[in-house]
Amino acid sequence: MIEIHSLDKTFDRNGPTPVHAVNHLSLTFGEGITGLVGENGAGKSTLFRLIAGTIRRDEGEIVIDGVPNDTPEARAALFFLPDTPYAPARYTASQVADFYSMFYPLDKELFKSLTTKVNLPLDRKIATFSKGMKRQLFLLIAFSAQCKNLLLDEAFDGLDPLVMELIREEVLRISIDQKKTIVISSHNIDSVQRIADSLTVLYRGQISEQKKLSDMGEELIKYQLISAHEVRAEDLEHLGYRVALCRTSGSIVSLIVVKQKGLEEDIKQLYAPSLLETVPLEGTELVTAEMMLAREGAHHE
């Protein structure tokens, strides 16, 4: 378990343009798989580096399995896979695993078994690996690490669909069998949603949303409509509604709006649609809508 209390980090604090990357953030990552999503600059990578202790926090507290994150016990309980992990280019894949085993207890047999599953050559130098192959290698090292907590930054970047499916199966297996806390950040929202138990949405270093996947979008409704009138988000916002998305494709307009009494009647009144129906939200739309609402809320503060 990873517990974060009033965590704060500002870069270039005394410069002309300080960046408040993490803003008095409090949250808990419990056992299971959490997807961490947000726009570029939302604070995802900074949060991971703060938890791992590779950068120092300005304020707040980070606790890993009951002990402060800057203690040897906490460091031994956490494996952090950054977006650009380090390994000497002259090393083979097997040597990279040996290198990481100096810092983390690795299950070597599990590692070899996993590399066989994805046909990753252990005797080749990683300088000859593609971006996707390097990402596979480091993910398999992370899965083989005997740590109760995994932070995987941009975990699925560069993976092809077949390998992605194998990785997904392995993440699910170790989460259940080894009862780990796994936090995954990725721009591939669909992939995260297929794996995660819950999602945490960050916006400007703060939580925009933190929910079980089964509860995501319960406050939102999606309409599709056809109207002879121009459909604009501003029309509904002027009436006090919060519009997360307004998109036109051909003659069909898609609207995602926070549920509120009288919404459908006002849509009919404004646009006299020839077609108006509610449709399920897609997975990516849920997260995108939450991020857009967070942005809109910040602009009105």
Image (cartoon, rainbow, N blue to C red):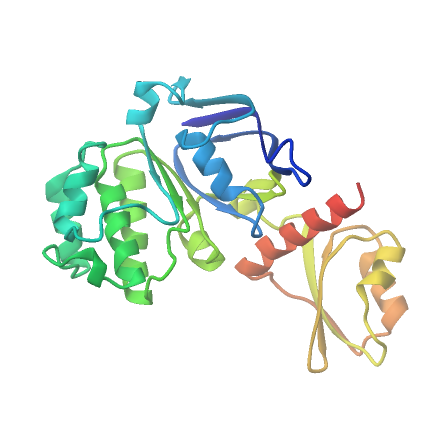
Percent x, y of residue 16? 69, 39
Percent x, y of residue 196? 43, 47
Q: Of all residues shown, which one is farthest toward the front? A: 15
Quadrant of the frame with the C terminus: top right
Quadrant of the frame with the N terminus: top left
Percent x, y of residue 299? 77, 47
Q: Taking 210 as reference, is 261 above or below it?
A: below
Q: Is residue 49 left or right of residue 89?
A: right
The reply to whether residue 199 is visible in this rendering is: no
The reply to whether residue 67 is visible in this rendering is: yes
Residue at x-position 60% and y-position 38%: 205
Percent x, y of residue 174? 27, 41
In depth, the one of 125 and 211 nearer the eye is: 125
Residue at x-position 60% and y-position 36%: 12
Q: Taking 251 as reference, is 175 above or below it?
A: above
Q: Is residue 294 left or right of residue 93?
A: right
Residue at x-position 81% and y-position 71%: 231
